[in-house]
Amino acid sequence: MSREIGLLLVALDQAYDHKSWHGTNLRGALRGLTAEEAALRTASGRPSIHELVVLLAYWKYTVLRQLTNLPKGSFPQKGSSWFPRENANSVQWNADRTLLERMHQELRAAVASLKPGELDRPSAKARYLKRDLILGAVAHDLHHGGQIQLIKRFTMKG
């Protein structure tokens, strides 16, 4: 594995579930949350943590699809990008966290299988370089991980 692929994997891991200097990673932000807590909103019309989890899974899938040329519509949930989770229960919450984990692991495996020269090539849809898609996935995890921390601060006591 090339040094650059290794660095991209480190970035993916630190943003998602490995210790890093920036503080809480995405999975850490979700640790210990109940379905009821994940359903809380800072205001009407704002996303819940639960909805962000499915959004994050979907966009990991979208990058995976670009890297591997998966067929459109192969995401395990019906729909695209936004998946409302009104009145979700703990079974759905656990399933959606498992989906996020699965999408992360599949994305990580796809990145690990890339050859260094592929990073400078366009994605399957020829819109972005593969390197840029991977770095975008890292930034997306970090962005929404911070958002989740803020939602928790504004909606939970203690």
Image (tube, rainbow, N blue to C red):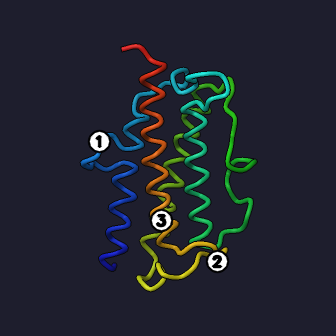
Q: Residues within 10 Å of mark 3 (few under 14, many from 20)?
A: many
| Percent of width and height locating residue 83 | 69, 40
| Percent of width and height locating residue 39 | 58, 25
Q: In this view, does 71 lie above or below 56?
A: below
| Percent of width and height locating residue 36 | 55, 20
Q: Hey, what amino acid is under mark 1?
A: Gly
Q: Is residue 66 above or below residue 61?
A: below
Point 35% across, 60% down: residue: 11
Q: Farthest residue in the left direction?
A: 21
Q: Name the residue under label 3.
A: 134
Point 67% across, 49% down: residue: 81
Asked which quadrant contains residue 42, the reply is top right
Which of the two labelled residues, at mark 2 and mark 1, occupies the earlier sequence position? 1
Q: Residues within 10 Å of mark 1 (few under 14, many from 20)?
A: few
Q: Is residue 37 above or below residue 2?
A: above
Which of the two labelled residues, at mark 2 and mark 3, occupies the earlier sequence position? 2
Q: How crowded is mark 2: few (under 14 residues within 10 Å), some or many (20 or more)?
A: few
Asked which quadrant contains residue 70, the reply is bottom right
Q: Is mark 2 on a helix, strand or loop?
A: loop
Residue 7: mark: none
Residue 126: mark: 2
Image side of residue 17 versus residue 100, left or right = left
| Percent of width and height locating residue 123 | 59, 75
